[in-house]
Amino acid sequence: MKNYQKKLFDILLKESEGRKKLVDIMIDKLALSNDTAYRRISGKSYITLNEGISLASHFGISLDSIHDSNINNAVVSKVHDIYNIDDLEKYFESSIYNLQKVKNTSDVEFIYAAKDIPLFYFMKFENLQKFKIYTWLKLMDTEFFSRRISFEEFELPEKIKRKGQLLSEVYHDVSSTEIWSNVTIHALIEQIIYFYQLEMISIDSVLKICDEIMCMLEFIEKETTNEKKNNKNTYFKLYQNDLLIMNNSVFIKFSDQKMLFLPYNILSYYYTLDERVCNNYEKSLELILKNSELLSANNKARNIFFNKMYKRVEELKRFIEIKL
């Protein structure tokens, strides 16, 4: 029989940053004595299934980390579903926590295959942040969807604003690679047009949002050119790939661990630490990147790429201004 208990505690010791801290957590969460906790860790006594699940849940790890999956199976976990503004707040908190865990890891690789513009950028701008959250709630919250609340009437709680801004700040402390295509901006433009045609957002608000989109794109273009985030030591690489439409998946690799996040419903994700699945996905990413253009390395390609997005925003502004 494989020693799954040893595998589990090897992971828990790494997550807890030390045996003493892990023992304290086991005493608190499992109501064990000091001696019993040490005996569990050393393997001198067996851990129960309930104890193992409780500890894995506390540290936010998946039991697939110690499970040898059948070649046709993979164990996945689910980030909690988002149905309302409270769920969104928890989503921000968990995202901040996960990013903070890896931001000080020197060898971290964070790769975002962007079907849509990553949410981290919207959080830096007042109207864009409000519009994206307004859109998400219209798509996820059945009660909010049923009420005819205009963008101007919608009041974004201050705590959500702050956590969204913190999420953006933490992301810019993490080195990352993003893969975009010519249609990555498409969803944002179509969402603005949709709510405008429903008369749920004013012309003035649309123009303010357009101005912030331009600022956001200029910000991203500058980081792309410099290959750095906010002139910090964190690197940033932006690739263009028009052969495939990405799916907003996130692949994270650091130390000897790999994680894959796959979207299934707007902001909701499945994730897995399954070694075979992560390795296969990593190979597919390598192939995608080989067939992509690193925009910092090609001035012409970068200018064409961003000019197309600026043009889309200008076209939207002209369309709206005609209505004035």
Image (cartoon, helix red, strand yellow):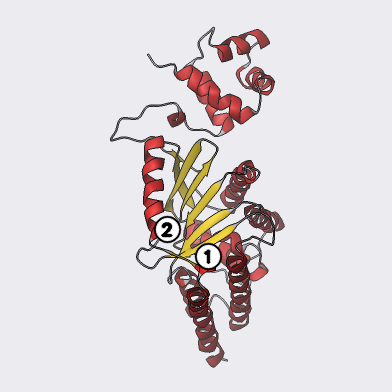
Quarter occupied by residue 207:
bottom right
Quarter of the C terminus within the rendering: bottom right
- Work out whether 271 lies above or below 65: below
The structure residue drawn at horizontal position 54% and vertical position 7%, both measured from the top left corner, is 44
Please report whichever mark, 1 or 2, sits nearer to the chain's N-terminal start: 1
Q: Look at the picture and state if 307 lies above or below 242.
A: below
In the displayed structure, does residue 92 sit left or right of residue 295? right
Is disc 2 placed on a helix, strand or loop?
helix
Residue 210, image x and y in percent? 59, 78
- Residue 172 in picture, x, y percent from top left: 64, 56
Outermost residue, front side: 297
What residue is shown at x 43% (from left), y 68% (from top)? 181
Residue under circle 1?
135
- Disc count in the image? 2
**Residue closest to the eye, 81 or 249:** 249
Mark 1 touches mark 2? (CB < 8 Å)? no
Tell me the kind of residue under disc 1.
Thr
